[in-house]
Image (cartoon, rainbow, N blue to C red):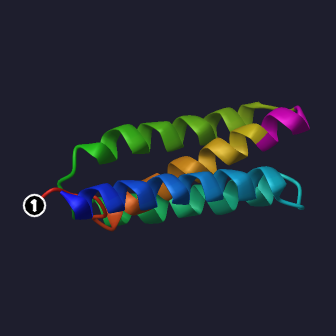
């Protein structure tokens, strides 16, 4: 049980750090950023294809939704917020793909 709590805490810290980095990023959230994140999402999808984890569906849906909203949004401040959400969703998706937090 202690290991599970530690893993959950690590996941939470990872998400917060990722979100803070995205909000503080110096570069613009432009088409290159969108393309990079789309490629990252496809890469994680390939990893998930070999796993049986119900958490993946929710995280994948959230990441895809954030990417779609990012592509549709024009205002820079809103794009930065959505980029932070996307980075956080991708971080959680990576954790699921890596099997972190799986109860065995």
Residue at the (60%, 38%) spot, across then down: 66
**Number of labelled discs?**
1
Q: Quadrant of the N terminus?
A: bottom left
Where, by quadrant of the figure, is residue 40 drawn? bottom right
Task: Give the residue pinned by disc 1.
Answer: 104
| Residue 93 appears left or right of 66 | left
Camera-side residue of 49 and 24: 24
Q: Which residues are magenta?
A: 75-80
Camera-side residue of 18 and 56: 18
Is residue 45 found inside the magenta-colored segment of the image?
A: no
| Residue 8 appears left or right of 42 | left
Could you tell me if residue 30 is visible in this image?
A: no
Q: Is residue 28 above or below residue 70?
A: below
Horizontal and vertical percent position of residue 81:
75, 39
Where, by quadrant of the figure, is residue 101 drawn? bottom left
Q: Quadrant of the C terminus?
A: bottom left
Horizontal and vertical percent position of residue 57:
32, 41
Q: Residue furthest left?
A: 104
Could you tell me if residue 29 is visible in this image?
A: yes
Q: Residue furthest front?
A: 2
Residue at the (42%, 56%) spot, across then down: 9
Residue at the (82%, 59%) spot, across then down: 25
| Residue 53 appears left or right of 94 | left
Camera-side residue of 51 and 99: 99
Horizontal and vertical percent position of residue 34:
71, 53
Residue at the (57%, 62%) spot, across then down: 39
Magenta stretch, main secondary structure class: helix
Where, by quadrant of the figure, is residue 11 drawn? bottom left
For label 1, count other residues whose C-alpha is less than 10 Å away and answer few (under 14), some (14-19) or many (20+).
Answer: few
SS of the residue under disc 1? loop
């Amino acid at each position: 049980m202690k290991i599970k709590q530690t893993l959950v805490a690590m996941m939470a810290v990872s998400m917060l750090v990722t979100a803070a980095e995205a909000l503080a990023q110096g570069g613009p959230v432009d088409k290159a950023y969108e393309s990079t994140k789309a490629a990252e999402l496809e890469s994680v999808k390939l990893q998930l294809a070999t796993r049986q984890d119900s958490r993946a569906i929710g995280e994948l849906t959230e990441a895809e939704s954030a990417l779609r909203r990012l592509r549709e949004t024009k205002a820079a401040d809103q794009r930065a917020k959505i980029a932070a959400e996307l980075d956080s969703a991708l971080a959680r998706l990576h954790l699921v793909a890596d099997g972190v937090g799986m109860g065995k």
